[in-house]
Image: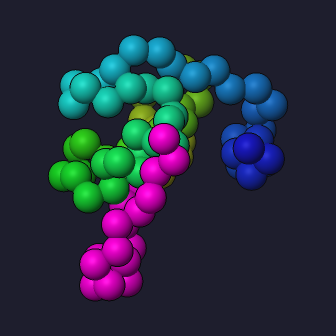
Amino acid sequence: MAALQRLSGVQAFKELTGTNEAGAPYELALRWAVEHLYDDYARRGACVVYKVGQDRPFVDIRFSASKAILRAGLIPMVAR
């Protein structure tokens, strides 16, 4: 959070509610991001930050499994 505050010059952020076109929730949920690490790009978890009054993202972070995890055949554990 501190890094986003430094980069953007903004101290407070508002999280969106609802879902996007792919059915993913706008709010960041770690469990959802982990469960969709192997999905197509559009269904993977993301954190997108917009500055007020701008249509383009300021920061767009996409979550995916690393190549090392894929090669090893490991599947991430999700606490239930």
Compared with 48, 6 (above or below) is below
Q: Nearer the viewer, residue 38 or 2?
A: 38
Which image quadrant: the N terminus?
top right
Residue 70, percent across and down? 29, 77
Extreme-top residue of the structure: 18
Whether residue 47 is visible: no
Q: Is residue 77 magenta?
A: yes
Extreme-front residue of the structure: 80
Q: Nearer the viewer, residue 12 or 45?
A: 45
Indicate the quadrant where residue 68 lies: bottom left
Q: Magenta region: which residues?
A: 63-80
Indicate the quadrant where residue 71 lies: bottom left
Compared with 20, 57 (above or below) is below
Residue 21, percent across and down? 22, 25
Q: Look at 63% across and 20% down and name the residue there.
A: 14
Q: Nearer the viewer, residue 19 or 80?
A: 80
Query: Is 24 displayed left or right of 80 in the figure?
Result: left
Q: Look at 58% across and 22% down and name the residue there.
A: 15
Compared with 34, 9 (above or below) is above
Q: Look at 33% across and 56% down and name the residue there.
A: 37
Q: Look at 28% across and 78% down and name the residue there.
A: 73
